[in-house]
Amino acid sequence: MSDTDAWGRICTDMKSTIGKEAYQSWIDPLSLDRIDQGIAHFAAPTSFIGRWVDRNYGERIRTSFAREGYSVTRLNFSVNPAVQKAAPQPRSAPAAQVAAPQTGDEELPGSPLDPRFTFDSFVVGKPNELAHAAARRVAEGGEVAFNPLVLYGGVGLGKTHLMHAIAWKLQEDNPGFRVLYLSAEQFMYRFVQALRFRDTISFKQMFRSVDVLMVDDVQFIAGKDSTQEEFFHTFNALIDQNKQVIISADRAPGEIDGMEDRIKSRLQWGLVADIHPTDYELRLGILQAKLDTQRAQHPNVTIDPKVIDFLAHRISSNVRVLEGALTRLYAFASLVGRHIDLDMTHECLTDLLRASERKVTIEEIMRKVAEYYHLRMNDLMSARRARVVARPRQVAMYLAKTLTSKSLPEIGRKFGGRDHTTVIHAVKRVEELKQNDSQIADDVELLRRMLEA
C-alpha cells in the first residue's frame, strides 16, 4: 500500500463527509508528497490554505491516516508554485454563499462553514456563557441589538464554533440573507487580489452589499496599513446601513498591537464578549458530548470513565486538542482492538500529554497564594492550624495537585514536610468547598487563571 493510495482513499471519504464544495476548496488543491517519521508532508497552493486545513481538518486527516495504518502526528504544508497554478480558487459552502460581483472571472466568496459547528453542538459553561448568549441573540436576526459583536479569547476556546453557528442559524431562518463569513487573512488576500487586478470597485461592492459580515481572527490584519484602511471603511459602511458585523479575535480589541486606534475604537462600539479558558467542568461536558459521536462511530470500543476525567484535568489549554485526543484514542483502540484505559491513554497520547505538561511550579503556587491571602510563604509551610492560614494552605495544596505533575509526597514535603494523606485531605476539602462556598470557588478559579496566564 503506497502513501498516495492511502491519501486517495482518505480524499474519497472526505469528499462524502465534508461536502463537495468544501472538498474542492480545501482538500483537492493539496498534494501529498510523503509521510516521514510521523509527519505527512503536503504541497499546498498557498500558505493560507495550508494553515486553514491544519486548523479545521487536521485532526480528521490524522485520524483517517490512523485508520489506514499510518501513525501521523503532524501535518506539514509547503507552498508549491506548480500546485498553485493548478489549484482552483476556494469556493464557499452553499449556506454561506453571497450573490457577488466578479473580479475578473473570479468570484469573491467567503470561507466554507463546518456543519459540525452549530449551537446544538456547542457545550455551554461558565467560561463561555456570555459569548454564547450574545451569539444566540445575534443569530435570532431582527433588529440589531449591538453592533458589532466581538468575541475574543485564546486559541481553541470556541470563537470559530460560535461564528459558524451564527451563520448557520441566520441562513436557516433567513434564506435570503447574504451572510459572508471569512477569516481576516482571506479578507486581506481578496483585497490584495483586487488591487492586483485593479478592480477594487467590485471588491467594495461585494463586501458592502452583505447583510451580515463575519470576520474571524481580525488580529491578523494588524500592521497591514492598506488592509486596515479598507477594513475600516467597509466596517463603517455596514454599520451606517445598520448591517450586522461580527468579529472574533484572540485578545480584546484594545490589546491588539499594530491595530489602528480608530479600528480599536470602532470594535468597542458594540458588545465585546470574552471567552475565558475552560474550567474542569466545561472540559468534562465537552468530552461527554464528544463521546456520543465516538460511540456511534466505534460501537465495539469501550472506555474507562477514569480516562475522561484524566483528559479533562490534563488537557486544559485548547478544546480542539482535547477533542482530538479523544478522537485519536478511539481510532487507535478501534485499529488494535483494545479497551481504552489509562495505560493505553498514556501510550497513545504521549506527545499531547508532554506538550500539555504544566510548567507551573509549587513554589510559584505558594508565592501567589501567600500574596493573594496576605500571608508569608513561611506561613504555608508552618505548623499553624488557625483557619486564616489552614484554608489558604489547603487551597495551595489543591492547586499544586491540579496544576503540576508532582506526586502527593512531593507536594507534602514542600509544605513543611507534611504527609501525603494531608495533601489528599486538602484536595478533597477544597473540592467540597468549591461546591458549597462561592467565595472559595471564585478564589480558586482566579488563582488558577493568574498562575496559568
Image: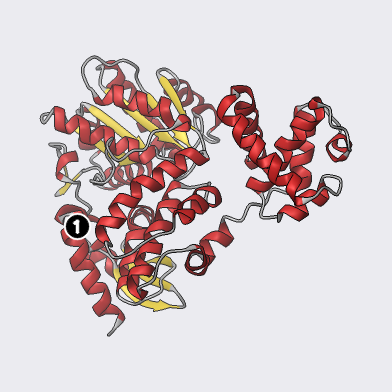
Towards the viewer: 196 or 135: 135
Q: Position of residue 258 (x, y in %)?
A: 53, 36
Against 312, residue 262 (above or below) is: above
Picture quarter containing residue 28? bottom left
Q: Is residue 127 visible?
A: yes
Residue flagged by tag 1: what amino acid is it?
Answer: Thr
Q: Position of residue 88 (x, y in %)?
A: 20, 59
Q: Is residue 80 visible?
A: no
Q: What residue is at 23 percent from the left and 62 percent from the top? A: 87
Relative side of 310 to 98, left or right: right
Q: What residue is at 58 percent from the left and 61 percent from the top? A: 354
Towards the viewer: 233 or 285: 285
Against 196, residue 129 (above or below) is: above
Q: How is the image coloured?
A: secondary structure
| Quarter the C terminus occupies | top right
Relative side of 297 to 343, left or right: left
Question: What is the total number of numbered labels drawn onto the structure image?
Answer: 1
Q: What residue is at 41 percent from the left and 41 percent from the top? A: 285
